[in-house]
Image: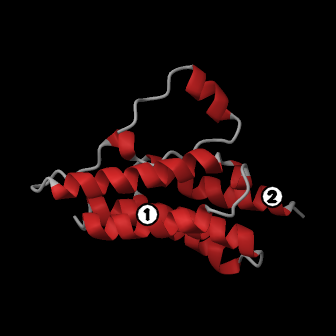
Amino acid sequence: MRCPDAELEAIVQSGLGAYSAGLFFEAHERWEVGWRDEPDPVRKAFLQGLILVAAAMHKLTRMKSPSGAVRLLRKAHARLAGVPEGTGGLAIGRLSDDVLRAASAIERRAGEGGTAGTELDPSLLPRMEPAGAVASSTRAGARPRA
């Protein structure tokens, strides 16, 4: 029998490939399978946060709804608020900061009109990085943020 942390990390990894490839709906679906069966409230909130981030990116890129994306990102941030660093093997603090940064930038760009609010600037995609990678990627020169 695998330990619960390994199971959670496997669920997270199952959606990360899709998320990184811009297949946000697919990532959402993969994480939702684990979320439905998760009995622990903190782990459930964590998975729901990931689901909401993926749904927000889908809402922005496919449905062209910046306001919907912002609403979902703000919900994701609230779900991630009580999740300990390293849950699911991810850098939760960085993800949480990125979610807020993306919501603000999408909201600002939508206010500029045109298609600016519905196009995903890759630098705004909330990063889902391994917990240990945060310190090294920051020193190595993380990409600039809007």
Q: Please, what is the three-letter code of the amino acid marked with disc 2?
A: Asp
Q: Position of residue 46 (x, y in %)?
A: 64, 65
Which mark is on residue 73? 1
What quarter of the picture does the N terminus occupy?
A: bottom right
- Taking the image as drawn, is residue 26 in sight? no
Q: Residue at x 66, y 61 (%)?
A: 11
Which mark is on residue 5? 2
Q: Position of residue 95 (x, y in %)?
A: 55, 49
- Taking the image as drawn, is residue 29 in sight? yes
Taking depth in this image into account, of 138 and 108 the one nearest to the observer is: 108
Q: Please, what is the three-letter code of the amino acid marked with disc 1?
A: Leu
Marks 1, 2: nearer the viewer: 1
Circle 2 sits in a helix, a strand or a loop, which is it? helix
Left or right, 130 with reference to 117:
right
Taking depth in this image into account, of 141 and 37 the one nearest to the observer is: 141
Q: Residue at x 25, y 53 (%)?
A: 108
Write down the quadrant of residue 110 in the picture.
bottom left
Tell me the CA gap for discs 1 and 2: 25 Å
Write down the quadrant of residue 34 in the picture.
bottom right
Q: Reply above or below: 130 against 116.
A: above
